Image (cartoon, rainbow, N blue to C red):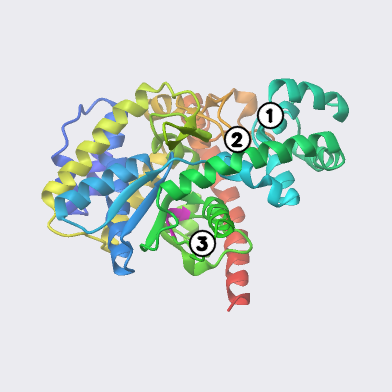
Amino acid sequence: MDRLTQYQKILAGNPTMAAVVRRVCFPPDDPVAVASACVLGPALGSFTQWLLANAMARGVRRLYFLARDGYLMRQAGEILCQTLGLPVDCRYLYCSRYALRLPNFHRDQNQALDFLCHDATGITSDRILRRAGLTPQERGEILPLLDLPPHAAITRSRLPEIRRALAGCPAFLDKMDRHSREAMPGLAGYLAQAGLLEEIPYALVDSGWIGTVQNTLGNTLAAMGSRRRLEGYYFGLYALPAEAQRTDYHCYYFAPEDGLTKKVHFSNCLFEAVFTAPHGMTLGYRHQNGRYVPRLGPDPDSGVFRKSQGYLCQYIQALAAQTQRLDTSALDRQTVAKLLTAFMTRPTRAEAEAFGSLPFSDDVLAGDEGQLAPSLTPARHPLQGWKSPWYAGSLARSGGHIRYHQFQYALLQYLRYSRKIYQARRERRGKR
């Protein structure tokens, strides 16, 4: 059975969604087109309908879609709101973990050091200092004081040692503090200009995973004088910041305390690589011609993204043309779960080659991206000691005993998320 037939078989259980897919014109032998029209489009459409319905039910009049994961979500929201005449203002907010955190480093040094020493693939001492906003010249001055080579890889076990070294280096702390204070006026000006200090009921929209951006943004606005408790809508959340109020975080696909099977068969890295934006990462903000504008990193060069975006927009336009009202039925989410499970955990070789070549980095700063699903050599098949942002994609690209390794990986994920869900439920009961 070819891939398109497999997706059509799943869609047959949801006639409304299947009818929308039939309105999209795509070549049946193109893996990017097929997956975009039959899997990613339905996921985006279902999430956006759920988002708008829930936001309006809570009286939300404005939605801020956070860069870069919210780029396509915002497009979908605007199309549905305009077609259905919904009273929701969909706005795009240029931001990133880095652009929000750096201006706040001077307010909490311990949190700043935690952020700087967060583990990521291919982390080096130079990259840690870049996270603090230090210039190349400043990094050259600080690295000898820390007795660290600039480009040697740092293992997770060494990060506490690096953190202690940074905490005990006055020259580094002074430079970090200065860069932080210099960055705060630009961030504050941009947020005020975007309307986040206005009294209108609004909420944030993002892909999710941990919810730290909402927490950081809320603390920043509080320091600017806002008394608002921020709310956010997310595709899914694995966990929340320790001080977060669970009722302020709304989840579509899975939440910290539930959704075990969905989490096991979901790849957040693949989701981020596809649902992104054609512009670079937000690095900060500057005042230009009387307005605050974002400073962006280099634009990504991805033909896969551009092709996928075209079919996703086709799907949303077809959905808007067909629907008379927002559909938030459980059937839609069940269908989306089946489609995402097939695509994310059992990709074909063609899908893995196309989407696995997308650039991806789990670091808070753009640059030095690798492939989303690099090929595995036979010696690297075992799970121990090797990571792939999209492991199922790497297996499909490499061949070999794919089903055996898929089973191993799924079992590992079940154990991992079972423990996290148990902890999240205990924490939620403890806060009642």
Q: Nearer the viewer, residue 117 or 62?
A: 62
In the image, is 242 to the left or to the right of 109?
left
Q: Nearer the viewer, mark 3 or mark 2?
A: 3
- Residue found at the very far bottom of the displayed protein: 432
Q: Is-magenta flag for residue 133?
A: no
Q: In which quarter of the image is residue 59?
A: bottom left
Q: Which of 29 and 256 is in front in this view?
A: 256
Circle 2: element type? loop
> Mark 3 is on which residue type?
Ser
Q: Which of marks 1 and 3 is in front?
A: 3
Q: Which of 67 and 240 is in front in this view?
A: 67
> Mark 2 is on which residue type?
Asp
Q: Magenta stretch?
A: 232-236
Q: Which of marks 2 and 1 is in front?
A: 1
Determine the residue positioned at 49% across, 52% down: 263
Q: Which mark is residue 363?
A: 2
Determine the residue positioned at 83% across, 43% down: 167
Q: How far apart are labels 1 and 3 at the CA level?
A: 33 Å
Quarter of the C terminus within the rendering: bottom right
> What residue is pinned by disc 1?
127
> What residue is pinned by disc 3?
226
Circle 1: element type? helix
Per the picture, the main secondary structure of the magenta-coloured stretch is strand
Q: Quadrant of residue 115?
A: top right
Q: Sequence order check: which comes first, mark 3 or mark 2?
A: 3
Callouts 2 and 1 close, C-beta under 8 Å: yes
In the image, is 261 to the left or to the right of 166?
left
Query: In the rendered image, is residue 2 in sight?
Result: no
Q: How far apart are labels 2 and 1 at the CA level?
A: 9 Å
